[in-house]
Structures are given as structure tokens and as C-alpha cells.
Image: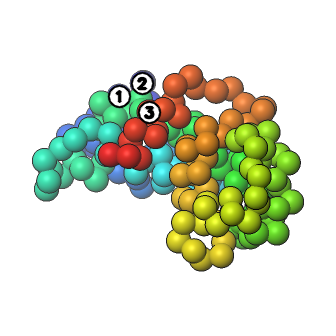
Amino acid sequence: KQWYQRRVAITAGGILSLAEIDKQIRDILHLDEIFDSKPAIMRAFQISKDCIKRKTGDVREDYVDRREFKFFLQALRQYFEYWVAFKRVDTDGDRRISYDEFLEAVPIMEVWCGAIGDSQAEFDKIDSNDGGLVLFEEFCNYAIAKGLDLEDDDGVEGLEEKLAKTQDA
């Protein structure tokens, strides 16, 4: 909250852009592994800036404001969890999950998400754009739908439901 109040004083209208948030994560936290998680930061920003309905054309619709910031922090924490899971499955580090990588990760995915059954059918379901590879956004949609929960994290109770509602809107 203090970080937001200091930062908001600098920006006009009490709003933060993705670039401002990204820069502050780098400059304040000084954690390269978090700064290198841009896909998680971007997803949390996108979902947060849309959690309050605004009139079309409102300049604030492309920013996170004070009312959305707490949700942004919660979403960021959740998307960091999805990013960690995604990276564990994406063993070659190309930011895409192949079927072979998915197949190898099925045992741990079942711990996180429940029984998978037919691995090819499940992979095809996750690969919603039929590109033959699972991208982070597709993985997040699947993770939200399945309630993915890493075994070695600190959960934020009820956040998956909030994210799912925002995805449906």
C-alpha cells in the first residue's frame, strides 16, 4: 500500500501502466527471477485492469488504479505460482510446452490439478489455439479451471474463484 501511495503521487490521476509496474518490480524488489517472469506480470496486469467496469473510452481502462491494485497484487502472486508450474513443465526453457514435456510432467501435474486420464486429449484441451504447443496464457486458463495448486507454495484463499469469475466476464 505504501509503495502504491508513493508511486501514485508521481502518476497523473492515480493510475499505473504496465511499464510503470514492471519498472517498480525491478527497482524495488531487486529480484531477477521475479523480473524475468514478465508473462506472469502481464497476465496479472491484464486481469486487474479489467476487474472494475468502466465506460468505453475511459483513459483509465488501460491502467491499474488504486481500487484495482490490491487485486493486482493477489493476481500477481497467483500468476507467479502458475509461472513456476509452467517453467517446471517447460523443461527446455523455450516458454512453450510440447506434448513430450507435458507427457513427462503428467505425474506432477496430477498432484497439482487432479487426475488427467488421456494425456493426449488433455494436452489438446489445454492447447486451445491448436498450435501444437501450450503457451503460458493457455496454461493459465487450464490452471484456473483446474484449480492448480503447487504443493510447495503459500496459497491465497479464494483467489482462484475470483480469477475464474474475471476470466468469464
Mark 2 residue type = Lys
Mark 3 residue type = Lys
Q: Can residue 14 be seen in the rendering of this structure?
A: yes
What's the mark number on residue 1?
Answer: 2
Quarter occupied by residue 36: bottom right
Camera-nearest residue between 157 and 63: 157
Residue 81 horizontal/vertical position (percent): 65, 41
Of callouts 3 and 2, which one flags the residue occurring earlier in the amino acid sequence?
2
Q: Which residue is mark 1?
A: 5
Residue 102 horizontal/vertical position (percent): 78, 61
Quarter occupied by residue 134: bottom right
Q: Which residue is mark 3?
A: 162
Camera-nearest residue between 76 and 146: 146
Nearer the observer: mark 3 or 2; the answer is 3
Of callouts 3 and 1, which one flags the residue occurring earlier in the amino acid sequence?
1
Camera-nearest residue between 98 and 38: 98
Residue at point 18%, 52% (across, down) = 59
